[in-house]
Image: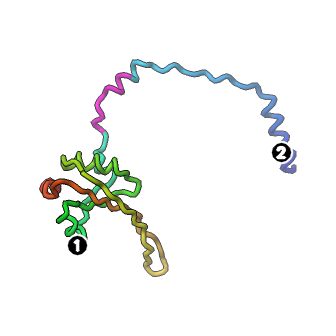
Amino acid sequence: MSLLTRATKALKKNEKEPKKKEVTKVKDVEAEKTSADAPASTAKPIADVIGLTALLTEKGMYAQEKNVAVFRVKPKASKGQIRQAIFEKFGVRPIAIRTAHFMGKRRRRGAQSGMTPAWKKAFVKVEDVTKLASEDA
């Protein structure tokens, strides 16, 4: 049997079957309201979601003299998420945030080759860097 005849038979079969009406279920509005009012205690902190970790490098130490802290975050993290995570974790409002993307590097072990993951560096300017250092655990 050729592909053309199979296709025509399948089309005829679909045309003969009556179309079923879809029944929509009415959702319980009250149940939705109670679930929306419930506290989100199971939600992870935003700092864990975006992978906020401090970067301790020589360049970062020089940046701290200018009240700039350096953090490593996931590549999809936005500046707004970084701002929110800094405030939640340290209780300090950032003045400015600059970000830089870093692509993964090729690594080899013998014949096996792979890539290190891509990441993002966030330069966060605050009024006093020592507030970030004292809270960091």
Q: Amino acid at mark 2?
A: Arg
Question: Between disc 2 and disc 1, whose residue precedes?
Answer: 2
Left or right: 45 in relation to 15: left
Question: Label 2 to label 1, Cα distance in Å?
Answer: 69 Å
Residue 18 appears at what percent x and percent y?
Answer: 76, 25
Residue 70 appears at what percent x and percent y?
Answer: 26, 62
Its colouring scheme is rainbow
> Can you see residue 137?
no
Query: Residue 17 or 65: which is nearer the viewer?
Result: 65
Which type of secondary structure does the marked residue at label 1 adopt?
Answer: helix
Quarter of the figure with residue 124: bottom left
Rendered residue at 45%/19% (across/down): 28
Question: Can you tell which mark lies on residue 58?
Answer: 1
**Marks 2 & 1, CB-CB < 8 Å contact:** no
Which type of secondary structure does the marked residue at label 2 adopt?
Answer: helix
Q: Amino acid at mark 1?
A: Glu
Rendered residue at 29%/55% (across/down): 52
Q: Which residue is mark 2?
A: 6
Question: Can you tell which mark lies on residue 128?
Answer: none
Position of the C terminus by quadrant: bottom left
Rendered residue at 84%/50% (across/down): 3
Residue 15 appears at what percent x and percent y?
Answer: 80, 31
Mark 2: few, some, or many residues within 10 Å (few <14, many ≥20)? few
User: Which residue range is magenta in the image?
Assistant: 33-42
Query: Residue 113 or 124: which is nearer the viewer?
Result: 124
> Can you see residue 116?
yes
Answer whether residue 56 is magenta in the image.
no
Quarter of the figure with residue 88: top left
- Eye-nearest disc, 2 or 1: 1
Residue 22 appears at what percent x and percent y?
Answer: 63, 24
Seen in the picture, residue 98 relative to 4 is either above or below; the reply is below
